[in-house]
Structures are given as structure tokens and as C-alpha cells.
Image (cartoon, rainbow, N blue to C red):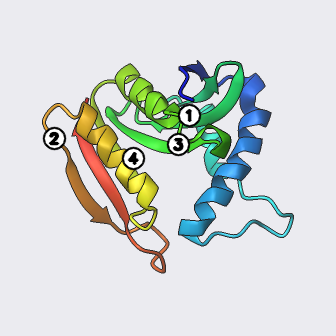
Amino acid sequence: MPSSITLQPITAEHHPLIERLWQLYRHDLSEYRYNYPGADGLYPTERLRTFFTDADRCGYLVKQGDQVAGFVLVRGLVSGLRVMGEFFVLRAARRQQVGWQAALAVLRRHPGDWEIAFQENNPGAARFWRRIAGELAVDGYKDEQRPVPGKPNIEPDTWLSFTV
């Protein structure tokens, strides 16, 4: 059943929670990225931590009522070209418009030029992000394939570029 969401800026007190959610997120992506956790059973969090310390980045905790439903990480706040760095909705909150509402809210909160990357072999993500871009893009969107830096063994990412 759809319900409204709220975005809560990530603060230092949320870091342990986001790091735990990160493990679920990376596990979900492993199906498309073929990533394995380390010997300790955990996925690395170095990239995640940059969203806690870099002024050009920010993050939001997505809440559905009083329940944690996911997170959104954005980069490009200062540089001008915003990038949806990471986007995660818990499986329990999917198919309830939580992701849709969260994506629209973040994109509208930071108007300007945007880029969003996803894996074409993830059909749910491909449909979702193209619908989002179609909904908000002022003058349509550009759709292109780009190689993943340092990962020649995986398929290129699809990048959508548009202005909100």
C-alpha cells in the first residue's frame, strides 16, 4: 500500500545505520556487478564514507512513516553537475512508490543538471530511471553507454543526462 515518504539529511548519528544498509545495497547490486564481499563477509565502505566528509556530497535517509526504507546519496552539490551517487530502497518498501517518491523529492530538492547511472542488465532499474527522467526532464534526456572505470570485465553503465 503506497504511503508518503520523508527524506532526512544524513548526520553523524546515522552513519552506523547507513553502513549497515550499505551492506544490503551492495548485496542487491552484486547480482549485476558480480562483486563479492571481503573475507570478513562485508562489502567495503570506503566509497560510502566520502558522502559523510565531502562538501560536494550529501545523503538522505528515506523513511516511510517511522520506518527506515532506504537511502539516497548525491554528489555534485558544489561542482554543479549533480549525480545520483547511490540509491537504495529496502525490498520490504519496494512496489509501494517509496523509490519513486524519494527520487522525485531528491531531484526536485537539487534542481539543475543531473546524471544517473544504472546497469542495463538490471531491467527494473532501467525502467525506473527512464520513467523518472521522462517525468522531470525539462528538455528530454540523453541516454548513453559509458565504460565502468577500472572494471573492463563488466558491461558499460547506462547514463541518463537531463535538467530538472
Residues at badges 3 and 1 in contact (C-beta under 8 Å)? no
Q: Which residue is rendered at x = 79% and y = 35% of the image?
A: 16
Q: Nearer the viewer, mark 1 or mark 2?
A: 2
First reached walking from the N terminus: tag 2 or tag 4 = 4
Q: Amino acid at mark 1?
A: Asp
Q: CA distance from mark 2 to mark 3?
A: 22 Å
Q: CA distance from mark 4 to mark 1?
A: 28 Å
Q: Which of the two discs, 3 and 4, labels the residue nearer the N terminus?
A: 3
Q: CA distance from mark 3 to mark 1?
A: 18 Å
Q: Residue at x 26, y 31 (%)?
A: 136
Measure the C-alpha gap from mark 1 to mark 2: 30 Å
Is residue 23 left or right of 105 when viewed as pictured? Answer: right
Mark 4 or 1, nearer chain start: 1
Report the amino acid beneath label 2. Answer: Gly
Disc 2 + disc 3, Cβ < 8 Å: no
Report, in whole angstroms, how far the alpha carbon at label 3 lies from the one at label 4.
12 Å
Residue at x-position 50% and y-position 36%? 99
The furthest residue to the left: 139
Residue sitting nearer the eye, 149 or 9: 9
What residue did someone put label 3 on? 87
Residue 64: image x %, image y %? 62, 24
**Residue pointed to by mark 1:** 54
Q: Within 10 angstroms of label 4, few (less than 14), some, or many (20 or more) residues? A: some
Which amino acid does the dot numbered 4 rest on? Answer: Phe
Tell me the quadrant of the picture where the N terminus can be found. top right
Query: How would you rate the neighbour count of disc 1 (Cα within 10 Å): few for under 14, some for 14-19, many for 20 or more?
Result: few
Instruction: Indicate the position of residue 47 as horizontal and vertical percent values.
Output: 61, 49
Mark 3, secondary structure of its residue: strand
What secondary structure is marked by label 1?
Answer: loop
